[in-house]
Image (cartoon, rainbow, N blue to C red):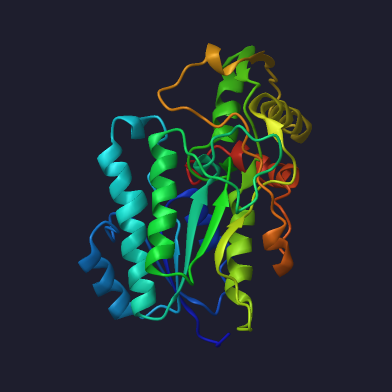
Amino acid sequence: MQASFKVLLTGARGQLGRCLQDIFPKQWDILAVDMADLDITEAAAINACVSGFKPDAIINAAAYTAVDKAQSESDLCYAVNVTGVRNLSCAAKKHNAKFIHISTDYVFDGNSAIPYAEDMQTDPQCVYGKTKLEGEIACMDANPASIIIRTAWVFSEYGHNFVKTMLNLGKTRDDISIVSDQIGCPTYAGDIAAAIIKLLQVQESENPPQGIYHFCGDQIVSWYEFAQAIFELARLTGDYPHTPHCHKIATLQYPTPAKRPAYSGLDCTKISKYKIEPSNWHRALTLILPILAKPCSENE
């Protein structure tokens, strides 16, 4: 890889976008944008940006991720998750830039009994999942050399996520009811960022990375079990003296507008050939919990 490597990053203010900016190699030239800076649904705007900046790689960390809201905002969800992805993928191909796009476990129906491999049948059950799958198809149709990373249950010290929600609830509640029949892999956004950088650093070879890869946490748990781990590790830090009691509930007891996959374990074997290991989410929790305990708004 050349000494001066230019990367256009979309979704710069999201969890993954912020984690990427924290660990980008110092010598790389980064243009980090959010929707306010660059509307990815506008092809002309993207082409003007890419033509001017001339990136060696484009990372699309932008997405419409409000799963329940997507049921009533399907047009906006489609615009960002499909049209936006197609625009970026086309621009990357036109300007000979590598393209990495982030997708989700929601492209599957959640009925599997084993971790999903990349070539297993997709069957999304909600608007969000359907647009993410259509975005994958649009991406690969426009630019077959693209890299798509499917991930799941993302958390970090930034933005809004399950870890922060649990910690906030734990401050004021003695009892919390948590769904126990949805199973998946918590994934630290910082580990996704590291995986992306490693893929970009892979030297050109006869078989460069392209196509779909799965990357997620190294342990499959339920939301209930994840919450228990969060509170136990939080207690051990000494920064969270109040530990609520967690109660198991079924998905049917907590109805939502969008259907979630009951099982969304992902098989990460394919990406491991690039020496990329699954996200150690226990270790990540121990690292970010002291950060989240600080009384500041920097990580909001």
Instruction: Out of 22 and 71, give the one closest to the viewer.
Output: 71
Horizontal and vertical percent position of residue 58: 43, 69
Horizontal and vertical percent position of residue 87: 31, 63
Q: Residue furthest bottom?
A: 2
The residue positioned 58% from the left and 85% from the top of the image is 1
Q: Is residue 12 visible?
A: no
Answer left or right for 196 relative to 34.
right
The residue positioned 70% from the left and 47% from the top of the image is 284
Q: Residue furthest front?
A: 121
Instruction: Out of 29 and 39, give the one closest to the viewer.
Output: 39
The residue positioned 24% from the left and 74% from the top of the image is 48
Q: Is residue 239 above or below residue 283?
A: above
Q: Residue furthest right?
A: 236
Horizontal and vertical percent position of residue 16: 51, 53
Q: Is residue 249 above or below residue 164?
A: above
- Count of marks overlaid on the render: 0
Picture quadrant where residue 153 is located = top right
Q: Is residue 198 above or below residue 184?
A: below
Picture quadrant where residue 9 is located = bottom left
Horizontal and vertical percent position of residue 298: 49, 46
Answer left or right for 297 relative to 37.
right
Q: Is residue 204 visible?
A: yes
Instruction: Out of 172 and 260, give the one closest to the viewer.
Output: 260
Answer left or right for 282 relative to 145.
right
The residue positioned 54% from the left and 11% from the top of the image is 253
Answer left or right for 15 relative to 275.
left
